Image: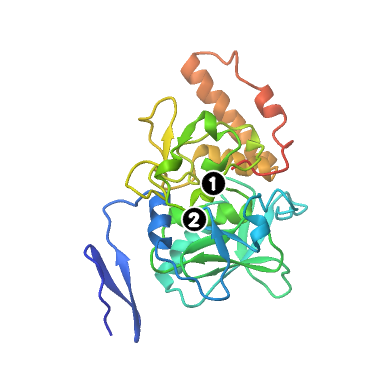
Amino acid sequence: ISCTCSEGDYNVCITCNCCCCAEVTSRELPVGELLERANRDRTPDFDEPTLIGGDIAIKSEVDRNADPCTASDCLWGKWSDGKVYIPYYIANHFSSREQAIIVRGLDSFSSVSCIRFRPYQNGDRDWVSIESRNGCYSYVGRQGGGQTVSLSRQGCLYHSTVQHELLHALGFNHEQTRSDRDSYIRVNWENIIEGMEYNFYKINTLNQGTPYDYNSVMQYERYAFSRNSLPTMVPIPNSNVSLGQATQMSQNDIVRLNRLYKCCKYMVVQLKKNIKEHTHTQGHSKGVPTAKYKNYSTDTTNGV
């Protein structure tokens, strides 16, 4: 069995009667571009959810113009040891190599936060079910029961896309929908594909006391949903700033995650790191914005 792949791709034999196309790249593309490529010609099955923002699954049209996470208790619970254990199931249609990519993404959270993804066990009430459906997508926050995180074998199996979709499942939205985004990017509505404008609607977020991050793994690239190959988003005031080029979680992504889930140990580590960096660059620690860190865990909603 063989399949026809586009130029720059190669055939990968998965089983005796199945194959798929894997992209050959000298470096991983930015996460926004990967997601748009994977979801561009998506034809959902009857049991798949409606998507907004390119890859955010919603249960009903009521959620289209609101943040479905901040409207309900969407956070995963913390255990007495201070860690957040999230059961996961990886569908058996992934190859061992593909599973390794997914597990690497799952494990990347444990070294920087109190989030611990662990294999599903009988009796678990809530879990993420990682499957190869049509495209890359996830619900925002804990939904209750098993919730699908789709990582299609046709374009979604990259470290950045795994982290991106898992951050959605943890409660985070896209950077460009932040409530304060108009101070940092200009949305060129005239360049957006007709009918796709809702992907750029702002959400009433608290932003976890962190600055807008052009390099967040949740930030789409400047041509996202463009109808004419012109930018749909431009950084301001400096239009030349790199936008949406992340291939993994940024430092701000990690800070927000720890603030949202009150990962105290990791917030202290981050504070010490920031003080050390400030001292190194300024020659003294005077003026370190400690008040900024005093109320790390006051926000109860996501900021992205």
- Badges 2 and 1: C-beta atoms under 8 Å apart? yes
Mark 2 is surrounded, within 10 Å at the Cα level, by few (under 14), some (14 to 19) or many (20 or more) other residues, namely: many
Q: Residue at x 42, y 42 (%)?
A: 190
The percent coordinates of residue 246 (x first, y second) are 42, 44
Q: Amino acid at mark 2?
A: Gly
- In which quadrant will I find the N terminus? bottom left
The image shows residue 207, relative to residue 193, as above or below, that is: above
- In which quadrant will I find the C terminus? top right
Q: Amino acid at mark 1?
A: His
The percent coordinates of residue 182 (x first, y second) are 53, 32
Mark 1 highlights which residue? 174
The answer to whether residue 141 is seen in the rendering is: no
Q: Residue furthest right?
A: 80
The answer to whether residue 294 is seen in the rendering is: yes
- The secondary element bearing badge 2 is classed as loop
Query: Would you say 243 lies left or right of 260 here?
Result: left
Mark 2 highlights which residue? 54
The percent coordinates of residue 36 (x first, y second) are 41, 56
